[in-house]
Image (tube, rainbow, N blue to C red):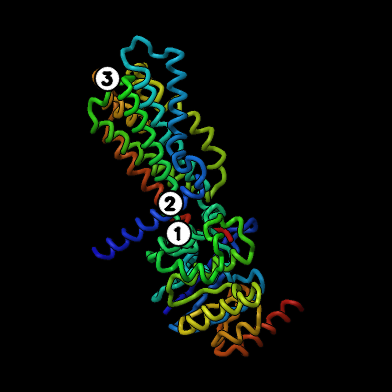
Amino acid sequence: MITLRNVSKQYPTRGGMRTVLDDINLTIRHGEKLGILGRNGSGKSTLIRLIGGAEKPSSGTVTRGMRVSWPLALISGFGGSLSGRDSLRLVCRLYGVDYTDKVGFVLDFTELGRYFDEPVQSYSHGMMARLAFAVSMVIDFDCYLIDEVVAVGDATFTERCNHELFGQRGHKAMVIVSHSDAFIRQHCDHAAVLVDGRLHTFDTNDQAFDFYQASLQVTAA
Amino acid sequence: MSTFRQGLRIQLRVLHALMLREMLTRYGRHNVGFLWLFLEPMMFTLAVVALWTAVGMHKGVGISIVAFGITGYSTIMLWRNMPGRAIGAIPPNASLLTHRPVQMFDVFAARILLEAIGATVSFAVLSFGAWMLGLMHGPEDVLKVLGGWLLLAWFSFAISLWLGAASELSSIVYKLWAPVSYIFIPLSGAVFLVEALPPVGQEVVLLMPVVHCVELIRDGYFGSLFHAYYSIGYVLVFNTVLTLFAMAQLRSLSRKGLQP
């Protein structure tokens, strides 16, 4: 279980402190699939990073009773001069996993071939995305943080990602940030909406989407 | 005990991973690659020692100019290069920090330790090489050399961590470190013996822990040829206080987090 208790996050700006997240309370249970909705800049990514531990709250506490992934991303941010193999090795070393068991899967998933030993900066966007995703699948987590990842890429890639994530790891907990209605409805049990730094959690996707639409109307008016 | 040991194991694993990555991103696999790690400080030191020899500095004092130069300039490579790598270390490594085993301390420590290893290997190779070539004598007391070097490495580690963390909170640190460290080169004890200074000057330079360390290292090498001035206690206290400051600075930085 992951618990956020009275979590707030502030960043200093020229105009003083800006509150990105305000008194957030959230619980994520084993196997739970939670969608997070919110406009651009509403703090969705910050929330994900707080859950993952890449960011520490300004106040409040985050307790993690399960192993939480890093926010899955489409680029492998380990430095362009590293090869795909180096990136895989690095992640395996960081998490204390045997690298030799994982090479086969990554080579197979990414179809990088001889590019696996070329620097990542020579990769196309597609190759980069496949590598980053495959490397994320190498470490076993109880909860995956997914930030708009799987919606990008060609159909085959999306399908294979979906298979790995929602097929093979379908019993894991997930926190999914997406702008795609269909994606959230398909994969999440329920959703929460971030508006003005506050998190509104709902029991169903429909309620969350209704509230989200209404909040957009209010700000537009 | 077991959680402490587990924590330590993770720490070492992460440091190992980050140092290997740092070597690859910095030196790549081309040419002599990671050999640059210690070739670079070696070339600096060699060039300066060659220059001093050519100019004929310290002729007639009885201390070999090669020994004086290597023991002196190598220390500069240590305390000046380590902070240089720590300052601004976080932004290019921001993506690593999304991995929970990786803490800001690890990012700094990996860079700083790598730099320390480079300077240490450079010092060891140069002094051993010069000794074998008969350009200088071997150390009279290896323990003093080792002690002085370790104290200086500790000082450099602490100040690097402090400046590295501070540089994320204020960009002034970037701008100031280059000129300030430049001014400290002639004051650091690398280019003089404390005994050669007037008493007032001695008091002033001995405020700097680096000077104590350099004197201790030289005492270990050729202590019979001059009177060394140092207080190990002073350096220990100074280093401890500096380390606490560095930890506090790092703590406030990691509380604040990265700007999105």
**Chain for disc number 1:** A
Please provide percent x and percent y for residue B134.
31, 20
| Quarter of the figure with residue B42 | top left
Name the residue nearer the viewer: B30 or A177.
Answer: B30
The residue where tag 2 is placed is B20
Name which of mark 3 and mark 2 comes first in the sequence: 2
- Amino acid type, mark 2: Leu
Name the residue nearer the viewer: B70 or B259.
Answer: B70
Identify the mark at residue B197; answer none if there is no mark. Answer: none
Q: Kindly report the distance in space between the C-alpha atoms of the residues bearing marks 3 and 2.
A: 42 Å
Give the structural element (helix, strand or loop) at label 1. Answer: helix
Q: Quadrant of the N terminus of chain A?
A: bottom left
Identify the mark at residue A90; answer none if there is no mark. Answer: 1
* Total number of numbered discs in the rendering: 3
Please provide percent x and percent y for residue A111.
56, 68
Q: Kindly report the distance in space between the C-alpha atoms of the residues bearing marks 2 and 1.
A: 8 Å
**Chain for disc number 2:** B
Numbered disc in front, either 3 or 1: 1
Give the structural element (helix, strand or loop) at label 2. Answer: helix
Residue A186 in view, yes or no: yes
- Amino acid type, mark 1: Leu
Name the residue nearer the viewer: A60 or A76.
Answer: A76
Q: Kindly report the distance in space between the C-alpha atoms of the residues bearing marks 3 and 1.
A: 50 Å
What residue do we see at 35% from left, 61% from top?
Answer: B10
Please provide percent x and percent y for residue A15.
65, 58
Q: Is residue A47 left or right of residue B127?
A: right
**Chain for disc number 3:** B
Whether residues under marks 2 and 1 lie with C-beta atoms below 8 angstroms apart, the answer is yes
The residue where tag 3 is placed is B227
Name the residue nearer the viewer: A60 or A99.
Answer: A99
Please provide percent x and percent y for residue B22.
47, 50
